[in-house]
Image (spheres, grey):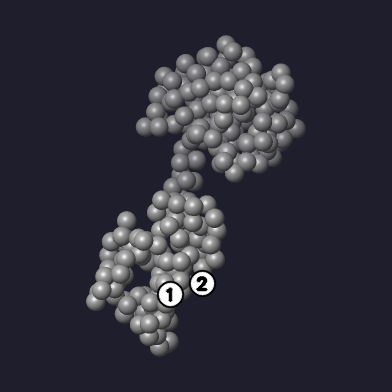
Amino acid sequence: MNNSYKILVVDDEQDLCEILKFNLELEGYSVDTANSAEEALGRGVSGYSLILLDVMMGGMSGFAMAKILKEDKATCKIPVIFVTARDTENDTVTGFNLGADDYISKPYSIKEVMLRVRAVLRRSASHDSAQQINTLRYEGLLLNIDKKTVSVDGKDVSFTKTEFEILKLLLEEKSRVFSRQELIDRIWPHDVFVLDRTVDVNITRLRKKIGPYSKHIVTRLGFGYLFDA
C-alpha cells in the first residue's frame, strides 16, 4: 500500500512543496516537506522511502545535499529524484553521477511526477526484496549468503566456512532440531570422516562468536541442536 511509503519533498518554493505534497497524499503516500537542504538535514532523513529534491536552492544546493546523503550509511540507499529547472546535459549527468534515481525538469506535469515516483519506488522495493532473499536475519544477527559474512549487532565477525554453514542451516529452519549426524551429512564433505565431538566443538565456537544470541542455539540432550527464536 502507498501509505507504507514516506516521502520527503525538499524545495525552497513553498507553493511547489505544497502542490507536490497535496498530490502525493492523494496517491496515498505519507509526505513531509522542507524549504531548504539545511532544514531537511537538521530534522533527519533516514526514515524516508524517497526524497524529491530541488537542485537550485538558497544556501546548500540539492547536489550538495545528495552528496551528503550518499556518503552516509544511514541514508545512502534512499532513492533520490531531482526535480529542478536545471536541465542541461551536464546537470543531468551530475545528478546521476551523485546517485540520483531519476531527474525531472521543470516545468513538469504532476502526472509525470506521480508516474516517476511510482516507478522509482517499485524499483527500490524490488531491489530490497532481492537483497532480502540473499540474507538471513534474527534481530541483530545477520548472515549475507552471497558475501558469506556474518555481523552481530552491526559488527562483522569472522567465521570459518563450517561455522557459517551450521549457522545458516539453523537459521533457515528455526525451531527444527538437527541431530549431530544430520549436521555432519548436510555440512561436511561426504568423503571426510567427522566425529560427533567435532560438531560440538564447532557449535561451542559458534556460540561464542554470536555473543548475545548464543542462548538461541539450544541443545536438546539426546537429540541435537536447534535455533530457538
Do the residues bearing badges 1 and 2 touch, measured as CB atoms within 8 Å? Answer: yes
Q: Nearer the viewer, residue 105 or 180?
A: 180
Residue 172 visible? The answer is: no
Location of residue 171 in the rendering, given as x and y in whole percent from the top left corner? 37, 61
Q: Residue at coordinates 65% horizontally, 33% vertically from top-left?
A: 66
Q: Nearer the viewer, residue 81 or 181?
A: 181
Nearer the observer, 168 or 109: 168
Q: Residue at x 66, y 41 (%)?
A: 71
Task: Write down the residue under mark 2.
Answer: 160
Label 2 amino acid? Thr
Local crowd at mark 2 within 10 Å, few (<14), some, or many (≥20)? few
Going from N to C along the chain, the mark reached first, 1 or 2, is: 2
Callout 2: SS: loop
Which type of secondary structure does the marked residue at label 1 adopt?
A: helix
Spot occupied by residue 208 in the image (x, y as percentages of width and height): 46, 66
Q: Residue at x 51, y 32 (%)?
A: 48
* C-alpha separation, residue under disc 1 versus residue under disc 2: 9 Å
Against 79, residue 12 (above or below) is above
Dot 1 corresponds to which residue?
202
Residue at 49% across / 46% down in the picture?
127
- Is 136 rendered above or below residue 85? below
Image height check: is 205 above or below 193? Answer: above
> Which amino acid does the dot numbered 1 rest on?
Asn
- Left or right relative to 163: residue 102: right
**Side of 69 relative to 191 (left or right):** right
Q: Quadrant of the N terminus?
A: top left
